[in-house]
């Protein structure tokens, strides 16, 4: 099979690997759509790798035993390689499994867990059926494109009475706009990049605030009659965005942190005095999957706007170069083109 690889700084292409073989609960999925996430951040760095991607939609082509799927099923490939047996996995919170990506939860066949590839090995219970009439590209948004922010909206019970602030209009944040608008919330976003700011408004954001403005928090409060937003979602990975959310969220409001923040210094007193609730979130609970798929069937036009570019996987270098400019929304690879 063909697999995307990085050979050095700004050098990428395809390599050949053996096709995977189904074994036990691990089934072979032929990938038809590979949404791209943050892997591009390593494109300009030193080093080599041939293990990229964690989002996919495709077709089951081989099974080793009867289970939850059969050959020919169209499925979304859920991320992670959890144990499936711990208390978190058994309650559907497999994204928080403490044994994620640890043996024996990953297939013995090395190099078969990346989605920038023509095939992948995956636990059968992590494959979600795709309904008739839903394309592979749309279905693939059930992973990071919509998944993380969907969970944030559920945790905070976002609804039509809420004003929601979303910081960072990368693909995760843009997906957050779709999720919040789907719940009829009023959406304000924080973004400095012109392309992404404009795309957020196309997806339904009511206002855009530039985080580089010294009075960004004041602007947000002005947009809410001085009250502050009800709910906030951090998708930028910028530590300053966390403090902005704390400053701009009303008392007794909720904030969800999604962006990959490594270190952040915040004024804890503001959290305590305001009585804020902070959530850390990744993927949604397995039990919420039907609701996610149902939403996808109802927001197809928004998804066509959200997915701004598709590339054959053979053009991986061009795709990563585009992502580095930020002049895009969600970008998707076709492994067979």
Image (spheres, grey):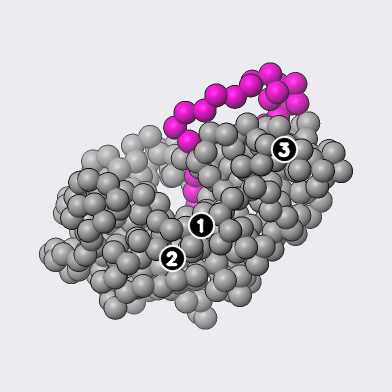
Residue 215 badge: 3
For the N terminus, give its image quadrant: bottom left
Residue 162 in the image, given as x and y percentages of width and height:
78, 49
Vertical placement of 227 versus 196: above or below?
Answer: above
Between 131 and 273, the residue placed more toward the observer is 273
For disc 2, the marked residue is 331
User: Can you tell which of label 3 and label 2 is closer to the viewer?
Assistant: 3
Residue 171 badge: 1
Element marked by disc 3 = loop
Mark 1 surroundings: few (<14), some (14-19) or many (≥20) residues within 10 A? many
Residue 32 in the image, given as x and y percentages of width and height:
35, 73
Residue range (magenta): 261-286
Between 183 and 332, the residue placed more toward the observer is 332
Vertical placement of 154 versus 139: above or below?
Answer: above
Q: Residue furthest bottom?
A: 133
Q: Is residue 283 magenta?
A: yes
């Amino acid at each position: 099979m063909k697999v995307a690889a990085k050979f050095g700084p700004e050098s990428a292409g395809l390599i050949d690997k053996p096709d995977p073989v189904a074994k036990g609960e691990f089934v072979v999925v032929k990938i038809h759509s590979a949404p791209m996430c943050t892997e591009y951040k390593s494109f300009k760095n030193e080093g080599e790798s041939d293990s990229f991607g964690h989002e996919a939609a495709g077709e089951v082509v081989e099974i080793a035993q009867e289970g939850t799927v059969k050959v020919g099923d169209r499925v979304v490939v859920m991320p992670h390689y959890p144990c499936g047996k711990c208390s978190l996995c058994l309650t559907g919170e497999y994204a928080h499994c403490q044994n994620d990506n640890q043996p024996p939860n990953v297939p013995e066949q090395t190099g078969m867990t990346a989605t920038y590839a023509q095939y992948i090995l995956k636990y059968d219970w992590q494959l979600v059926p795709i309904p008739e009439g839903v394309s592979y590209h749309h279905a693939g948004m059930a992973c990071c494109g919509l998944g993380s922010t969907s969970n944030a909206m559920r945790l905070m019970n976002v609804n039509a009475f809420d004003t929601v602030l979303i910081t960072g209009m990368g693909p995760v944040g843009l997906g957050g706009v779709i999720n919040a608008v789907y719940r009829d919330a009023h959406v304000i976003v924080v973004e400095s990049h012109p392309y992404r700011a404009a795309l957020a408004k196309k997806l339904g954001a009511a206002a855009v605030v530039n985080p580089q403005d010294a009075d960004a928090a004041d602007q947000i409060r002005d947009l809410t009659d001085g009250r502050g937003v009800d709910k906030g979602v951090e998708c930028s990975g910028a530590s300053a965005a966390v403090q902005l959310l704390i400053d701009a969220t009303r008392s007794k409001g909720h904030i969800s942190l999604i962006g990959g923040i490594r270190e952040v210094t915040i004024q804890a007193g503001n959290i305590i005095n305001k009585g804020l609730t902070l959530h850390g979130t990744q993927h949604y609970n397995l039990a919420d999957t039907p609701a996610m798929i149902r939403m996808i069937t109802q927001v197809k036009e928004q998804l066509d706007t959200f997915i701004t570019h598709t590339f054959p996987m053979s053009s991986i270098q061009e795709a990563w170069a585009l992502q580095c400019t930020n002049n895009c929304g969600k970008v998707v690879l076709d492994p067979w083109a």
